[in-house]
Image: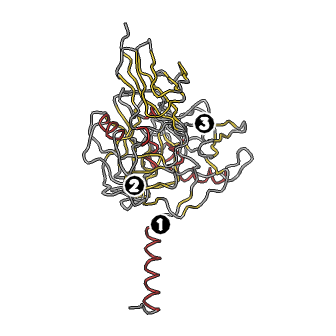
Amino acid sequence: MLQTPRKLSLAIISVFITLIINAQAVNKTMKRLPGTGQTTSYTNTFGEDADYNFNPPFYRLNGNGTITDTVTELMWQKTDGGEMTIENATIYCDTLTLGGYTDWRLPNCHELFSILHHDKTNPAINTTYFTLTAAEYWWSSQKQVNDATKVWCTNAGGGVGNHPKLETISAGGTKRFHVRAVRDITSPPLLPNHYTNNGDGTTTDLLTNLIWKQSFSADSITWEQALIEAENLNFSGHTDWRLPDIKELQSINDESLINPSVSTVYFNGMKAAFFWSSTTLPNQNSKAWYLDTRYGITTYANKVNKNYALFVRNANATSGIIKNQSTLRTCSIYPNPTQGEIFLESDLIVDAITITNSLGQVIRKIMPDAKKVKVVLNEPGVYCIYFKIGSQINVRKVLVLNTQ
């Protein structure tokens, strides 16, 4: 039976309201999400942060007191503005003239987290570019959703959390909360949605172009187990899943939500819990960073503790490492560990091989143009073997034991 015009109008309005409720219109202020900067290996188990190299941080000094992040395409104040209250921090950014620009603002916590460097500590920033100051924390523009007396801040240790406004010295506290201004180089586009449900158990984040498995690990597991589960995952026709680094993990946190602080619409069964990242705490390498989805704090725990794991892959990986593509399932490196002699065998022609040591230094390049390649490594240690097959770059970590 045909609907009356009034009923049809009500139905259209209902659909429109539903779309508004489910939509998450958001400004895309960062062109790409930077990597953590972590290049040091802390385990022989493949899948840690250092095993992947997507969007490594890269800055440009502008010579006028500003820095351009070429990954996010945001411009930053080189030397932070010093310790002050959150109220004064907002005024400071809104009235700042620097480098000939007057459109500075206080960054949100995701932008602020993007410049942290997770192979460095105290401070976890790149002081080759950003001036070293006495800051312990840096203010963001976001307050805790259910408590306006708390503000989201990053800290010199590499984390992000919600802190009382009164903790800073200028407000009568004992800690140093500084301000660092940011500006948009170009007008950020407004995306009608933050996420897209792909209909296959995965969600695409339109801000970062990352694809997430909507459901997380069935059980809480150790950090090493989380790496292994991610690397072995075959889901929705893809095998290039991995454990997210801490910046990727923090990127899905929604500061307007609590318990959990990640969308339950786009992440099935999401709950307030701890979720491992692939990123190690560099000055205490028995610990790794995790996301606490009660509010969205990033902190760390012993790797033998048991937390849950979320799984991620790149939507359009045109650079970095792409592991175990479906056309390369028969590709293998053996034996591993080895006494020095290894064989790489693939069902497709291997065009090029690059071998790096544990410091990330290239020690050998080979152009085999063959499906089976023999490689001899004379020194014990951990090596990454990157092999190019067509347009794909793949990697395996190899442990060389004492060759004597």
Could you tell me how far apart the alpha carbons at marks 3 and 1 are, in whole angstroms? 33 Å
Picture residue at 55% right of the left edge, 61% below the top: 191
Ranked by sequence position, the earlier of labels 2 and 3 is: 3
Specify the quadrant of the image occupied by residue 267.
bottom left
User: Quarter holding the N terminus?
Assistant: bottom left
- Write down the residue under mark 1: 23
Picture residue at 36% right of the left edge, 47% below the top: 310
Q: Secondary structure at mark 2?
A: strand
Q: Amino acid at mark 3?
A: Phe
Q: Position of residue 62 (x, y in %)?
A: 71, 38
Q: Amino acid at mark 2?
A: Thr
The residue furthest right is 100
Specify the quadrant of the image occupied by residue 21.
bottom left
- Write down the residue under mark 2: 202
Question: What colouring does the structure picture have?
Answer: secondary structure
The residue furthest left is 219
- Write down the residue under mark 3: 58
Could you tell me how far apart the alpha carbons at marks 1 and 2 are, in whole angstroms? 17 Å
Frontmost residue, 370 versus 6 = 370
Q: Amino acid at mark 1?
A: Ala
Ranked by sequence position, the earlier of labels 3 and 1 is: 1
Ranked by sequence position, the earlier of labels 1 and 2 is: 1
Q: Secondary structure at mark 3?
A: loop
Query: As displayed, is residue 297 above or below residue 197?
Result: above
Relative horizontal placement of residue 103, taking residue 238 as reference (left or right): right
